[in-house]
Structures are given as structure tokens and as C-alpha cells.
Image (spheres, coloured by chain):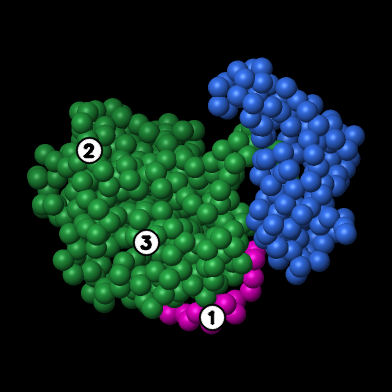
Amino acid sequence: MTIRGAAYVAGIYEHPRRDIPDRTLFEIHTEVALGALADAGLSMTDVDAVFCDGTAGFGPMSLVEHFGLNPSYIDSTETGGSSYLAHVGHAAAAIAAGKCSVALITLAGKPRTGRSVVAYAQSPEAGFESGWGVSGAPHTYALAAQRHMYEFGTTSAQLAEIKVAASIHAQYNPNAFLPYAVTVEDVLNSPLVADPLHRLDCCVVTDGGGALVVVSPEVARSLNRTSAKILGHGEAIKHTSNGGIDLTYTGAVWSGPRAFAEAGVSVADIKYASIYDSFTITVLQTIEDLGFCEKGQGGKFVMDGGLVAPFGKLPFNTDGGGLCNNHPSNRGGITKVIEAVRQMRGEAHPSVQVPNCQISLAHGTGGSLGSKHGSVTLILGQEDA
Amino acid sequence: MLPAPAPVINSTTAEFWKATTEGRFLLQRCDACDIVLWFPRRNCPKCWTEDVSTFDAQQTGTIYSFTVVRKGKGVFQDAGPFVIAYVELADGPRIMTNIVDCDIDSLHIGMPVEMVFHDTGEGSALYRFRPVSR
């Protein structure tokens, strides 16, 4: 059994705000849940499965209580920012198994105006990864960037091209945190945060959230709204491998082939890709690992507008991505799925809508390239794909 | 000196951290698989046996990757620019650490480094590295 065609993304909602001092975390969950359900033409009473990350209280229990539901399926898989792509795959599998028919996936967070959640002090590796002054994601992603440069000759200017492409797209998104285009020089002239990553190599920090509604084929057919068909899903965790960490690749080398095999498509079929962009290096390594170019050739691939919609080699992150638009709760996975669904529906901004966008890919990378991360790849098609 | 915050210590890692206060760096080897383990564990992560032995590791290695953190947070807030790195030990494992006592601009991947210990004052010392002096 595969999940190919077993479920559809019928509803999406991205919180329009980037600073939300006047709402609690759980109020934002409600807001985005109702938004995505309304987009699908469904209501809270239709929901029979709830998915959330590990920051929404006590596992999934707090959120289910908050929503006042009695779901027959629950899942709080936590792989950082890629959690929500895993939730889509797990929801599709649960629907295929007959466990549920309307799955609600929500994300909310307030890193700008609330408290960030960090809770792995009890992990076995904690004493060996936390004493070195690592106080932000840039510090360990920088280690991956430095090694990639050393092995493959990747340059800071090439990494900057990724930010430039995202910023070109962000100009068309009025909700974007940074809604304007930047140049390679702007990126290179921004302050170094952790060599070789500059400030503009990093994603934005935003409050907010988003939600997805994943439904069975029967429910999808009953709705007036166009859905996106879930064709394939793959997930993997890449870790330090008992002191054998290799910083030049990501878990996408495993999640990608799993998703492509299930979908029965190849990289040549992908017209649009939402690629997790916590940092420019995250994108560069991921497009190599998914097979859009050879290992080590990502720097060349992204030059000359390779990622710019609608006519680049691989149009990516047409909402402006985490690099410019939104990275709610320091987790960019849900917006990756949301923009891919917009592309499948033909509802991206006209300036960046990819023509005949029949098959798209969304990829999440949660955790750190510099130690351990969860990679999740989804392949989506138009409703009749 | 770069701040040396005390690590989280549990029953599995107590022996390792106690040794650091004596200037020793312990590694484990799985007697069944003959592989070196990192970080300290009760079970080999390859065959899951508890038959792992401990040995005094060589205190040298080379830089596998590094970054210069321009401004730290918490106890590192006033440390100025400092270096986080992975060092590949002579005994094999690549371990996260700091490079200290160095000219930041002269650091490079592959650079030979040697271990130094910075006492945390709480029954442990952080293992850090400096360039090998010629």
C-alpha cells in the first residue's frame, strides 16, 4: 500500500501577521485552524484527527482539549520545522488506513513577542553539543556551509543568489516580513553572524502560524474548493552517526528518493519546489540532495536566476520563503506546504505563478544541518493528477 | 578565557567528565564491533552490547569545520568573537568543540590542533583545542 492519491490537502491558511503580541499561542492555533477549515469549506466539527508539534503543550493533549475535540487519530511528531510535512504524510497514511477522514494540522508560535521553547537538556548528547556557545541555529548551520565551501568550492556569492531569488518573490507578497528585493552585494555586505553566514543568509524571525486540512478522496470530492493531491512522502533523520558526521549532505538524500518512489515521478516532473530555507546553505544542500543537480554543483545551479519564478530552472519559494516572507515560530515547514498548494491551485501571485504547474515538491529540514535534523519530502499534484 | 559553562552530567557520562578534571579524555570502544564510540553510552549504537571498554584517547586532531560566532549569548555574551568547530580526533570521532588561543583569521579546515582543558569549577572541564605550536 502507498499513500499515492489516498489523501488531499483541501484547506490551507497562513497567518497574515508577523508580530502578534495580543494573542496567546493557543489562540493563534485556533485562528489558523478555523482559517484552513474555512478555506476547505469544512468546520471544526468535521475534524477527526489532530496533528501538532511538540511545542503545543503536553503532547497533542493540550491542543485537543483546547479545540474541544474527540479525534480518533492523534500525532505530535516533532522534527522541528519539518514536523508539519511529516504530519501531512502521517495523515495521508492514517486516512489510507481508514483511521480518519479530516485531519487538522496546525502551527503557532511567538518568537518575537513570546517565549521560545527549547527542551532537550535531558537528551544524551546535550552535554556534548551545548557547552560551546551555540546559542542559535546560525552557529551550527555555518559549520555545514564552511565544510561545503571547502569540499566543493561553493562561494558566499552563490549562497547570496538564493536570498536574492527569494527576495524577488517576496516583493509580490504584501504580508512578507521583508517585502523587497535585495542584491548579492546587499547579502555580502550584511554583518557576519557566524562565518561564512551573513545576516541576510538567515531566515526572518516571525510570530504567526499556519494550518493545513488533509482529507480523504471522498471528502475532497464533496468540497467546492480545489484540493492538491498527495502523491508521495518520505522522511528521514540524519544525525551525528556516532562521531561520524558528514556536514556536506542532508537527510534529503533519503527522504527524497522515498517520496519520488512513492509518487512515481522524477525530478524532471517537478515544476515548482518549496525548499526549506532556514538559511541559504539549507537550500543549496537540499537541491543537490534531492537530485536537482549533482552533489557539489548547487552553487552553479542557483546562479543566473536558477531559482527565480516563473521561468528559472527550478522556481522555488514563491511566497518569499523563510528567508524573506515568514518563518513562524522559527519553523518554516507549514508555509512550504501552503505555497506549494497555492501553486497547484494556480493561486500564487500572478507574477510568480508557474504555468501548467501540475506537480510540485515541498521539503522540510528541522533541527540542524550541523548536528541532527529531520528531513521530510512531499510531492503534490493537481487534484486530477 | 572563553567562558566554561558546566555541562549536563548523568550516570552514563559521570566517568567521562570526572576524567576531564584530571586532563584526560576518555573514549569508549565496542569490544564486539571494534568501533570507537562518541559520545559516552552504555550500549554500542551498532550492536547494542554493553561490552564497551574505556580508553585514554589521543588529545590531537584536525579541524573538520569551524565558524566564528561574531556575538554570543548568555554567558558568552561578552566573549567577543569565538570559534565553534568540529574536530576530527586522531582516534576517529568528529566532535563539537571550541578552538581557543588562536589567530581567528589563520584558522583553516585540516589545521592540526591539540586539546586543552578549561575547568568549569563544578567537577568538570571542557575539552577545547588550540593550534599545534610549531
Chain holding disc 1: A
In the rendering, what colour is chain B? blue
The residue drawn where x is 30% and y is 73% is A312
Nearer the observer: mark 3 or 1; the answer is 3
Residue assigned mark 1: A186
Q: Are marks 3 and 2 on the same chain?
A: yes
Percent x, y of residue A240: 58, 41
Chain in green colour:
A
Q: Main secondary structure of the magenta part?
A: loop
Residue assigned mark 2: A3
Residue assigned mark 3: A293
What range is drawn magenta here?
Answer: A173-195
Percent x, y of residue B3: 82, 52
Percent x, y of residue B32: 62, 20
Q: Are marks 3 and 1 on the same chain?
A: yes
Q: Quadrant of residue B29?
A: top right
Which amino acid is tagged 1?
Asp
**A227 w.r.t. A66: above or below:** below
Is residue B71 shown left or right of residue A217?
right
**B108 w.r.t. B121: above or below:** below
Contact? badges 2 and 1 (CB < 8 Å): no
Which amino acid is tagged 2?
Ile
* Residue A168 belongs to magenta span: no
Nearer-the-camera pick, B131 or B14: B131
Which amino acid is tagged 3?
Cys
Is residue A272 shown left or right of residue B37?
left
- The first of marks 2 and 1 along the sequence is 2
The residue drawn where x is 30% and y is 45% is A259
